[in-house]
Structure formats: structure tokens, C-alpha cells
Image (cartoon, rainbow, N blue to C red):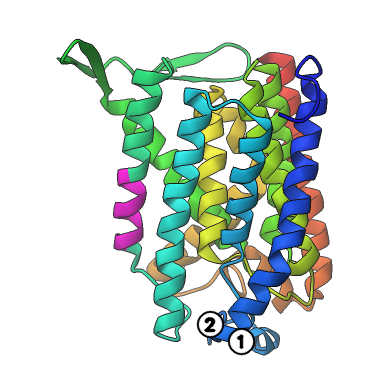
Amino acid sequence: MFGNPRYPTYQVFLAAAISALLTMLIMPLFIKMMRHEGVGQQIRADGPQQHLVKQGTPTMGGVVMLLAIILTCMIQARWTNDLKLAVAAMLATGSLGLLDDIESVAHKRSLGLTPSQKMIGLAIISIGFCLLSVNLCAISPAIRFPGGFMIDLGVLTSKFKMGSMPVSIPWLYMVFVFLLMAGLSNAVNLTDGLDGLAGGCSFGVMMAMSMVAFRYDAINLSIFAAAIAGACVGFLWFNGHPASIFMGDTGSLSLGAAFAALAVLTKTEVTSLIMGGLFIIEALSVIIQVVCFKLTHKRVFLMAPIHHHFEKLGWDENKVVLRFWIVAAAFAVLGFALYFKLG
């Protein structure tokens, strides 16, 4: 471990720097390899016309981000059970995203796995994560709100022994964790539609989560979140407009899953929804658009997710991204302030 463990804040900021540096060093080699293999992003035909020039841009940059995060944790953190679980959730969801990216590239279409295939994969991952969190890390199956209000989702729990080990299955909490992890994974995935958008928004959220984990006295989770934030910075060097590479579902799904895992392991499930408010807005814009069109055959937005709506209004891509970064940062600060003040 680099640095002096007596100064944990130093360890956290160093983790962000190491992760950013590793991402920036490895990414050019990965981009070169993707170009050599002809692996490029498939752009949706019904999207903004100015995005068609991005067709064929190398994708799956999330692979490098995940590698940088893991290497940073190996250097900086101690592999406690909570860190192992968070990393496992991130890697498992990243693997699901990788399958989606490979499917998309192989068939030369913007859609990879079917929605049902994705949801089955996310269900398996989230259920496994929930059971291990409750039984290995003693995570309480309850939802805590700012101010002390709590809803106990452990009221419907099955208990039995596996050998000499007691096992609990909190059915209601397991459903909640699935909704949280699947929801945030898909929300970040939907946000990843403009150059630098998902990476920049995730940076602010992960820095806030790193501070939450630090205050929760989970230093290794704080290092993990900081490593993710650093990887986002390193990725943005190549993903800023015009992007040289996209993170793909490998990156966006794993970022959302890591966010959800951190929220569960630090008991900030509700506060995390405020911190990730921009992601929630992106997801809600799609839900509202689909529901309204099915019911009334009219669209609320010119195009969903909502970042495309502003493009259709004539906003430049960089203008949309910059303003969404500001909104995302404001939500992250608000969520952390509520956690710090009322938690």
C-alpha cells in the first residue's frame, strides 16, 4: 500500500490519482487495438443525425476502466468482505455489459442483448449481492431515510442453517436491492449518450460516495469509490468531444452497479437516489416518454433520454454535457449534505 495508512484521506486521493493515471496510460493501447480489430460503436438510426459521424468509433473502453480500478484497489486497499462484494458486483455487471457490447458489435446493430436477457442477468447479480451483503457483511435489511426514519424490509425473512452457518433470506429487501441495482445500472446506461456525459456525471457522484464511505468508516470502500472517480477522469481524456472511444455497456452498467453496491454497503440507499438525481431524471424521461406515447400517442419530449431533447432544441453537444455535469454535481453535493447533516 502506497502512502501512510495513518493518513486515510491521503490514501483515498492517491487512489483517485493512480486510477486516473493507469486509465490514461492503458487507454491509447486499447484504442489502437480496437481500431485494428475494427471494433466500433453502432449508432441508433433514429438518433440525432449529427451523431451518425460517430459510427465506428472504438467502444468497450469500460474494460480499461475496470482494469484500472482493480489494479488501484490491489495497490491501495485491503480486501475486506465489503470491498470484495462491491468489486464482484461491478465486475459481474461489467461482464454482462461486455456481452451486450460484443453482441452489438458482432451483429452491427445498436442493440445487443435483449431487455429480458439484461434483466435476468441483473436479477441474478443483485440477488447474489444482497444475500452475501446480509449474511457476510451483516448489512441490515432496512432502508434508512435522512433524519432517522427507517423502513424495516427484514420483516419477511427466511432463516435456516447451511452446515453450521446461519443464512437469512430477506425477501422484501432482496427485491429492493434488485430494483436499486437494476435501476441505477440502466439509468447510467441511458445517460451514456453524449461524449463525456456519463463519465463526467459519474465522477462527481463517486467522489461524493467516497466521502460518504469515509464518514461511514469504510476506508476500503472509500478507496474503491475514489478509484472509480479517477478512472472516469482518465477516461474523459479520451471520451471528451469528439470522443476517441466510448465506454460501452461494459462501463455504464458496471458504474451503475458499483454505485448501487456502495449505497447498500454504506446504508445510503435513499440518499444515493438524491446523489444520482441526474441519472434518475434521465431514466424517468424515458419511462415518461414511453408511457405517454402508449397512452396518448403523443411525445412529451422531442426525444428521450432527455439529453437528446435538448439537442433537438438546438443546444450544442458540449453545452448539454457541461450543463448536465453541473446538475449532476449539484445533486451529488445535495445528497452528501443531507447525509452529513441528517444521517
Describe the element under mark 1 as helix, strand or loop.
loop
Amino acid bearing label 1? Gln
| 23 sits left or right of 104 in the view | right
Q: Residue at x 38, y 34 (%)?
A: 129
Left or right: where 30 falls relative to 99: right
Residue extent of the magenta highlight = 116-124
Identify whether 54 is placed above or below 248.
below
Q: Main secondary structure of the magenta part?
A: helix
**In front of the other: 281 or 162:** 162
Q: Point out which mark residue 160 bears.
A: none
* Residue sitting nearer the eye, 318 or 308: 318
- Residue at (66% x, 22% y) in the render: 219
242 magenta-colored: no
Total count of labels: 2
Which label belongs to residue 55? 1
Where residue 311 appears, as percent x and y from the top left, is 72, 75
Residue picked out by circle 2: 42
Q: On screen, 85 above or below 92?
A: above
Residue closest to the eye, 143 or 201: 201
The alpha-carbon separation of the residues under discs 2 and 1 comes to 6 Å
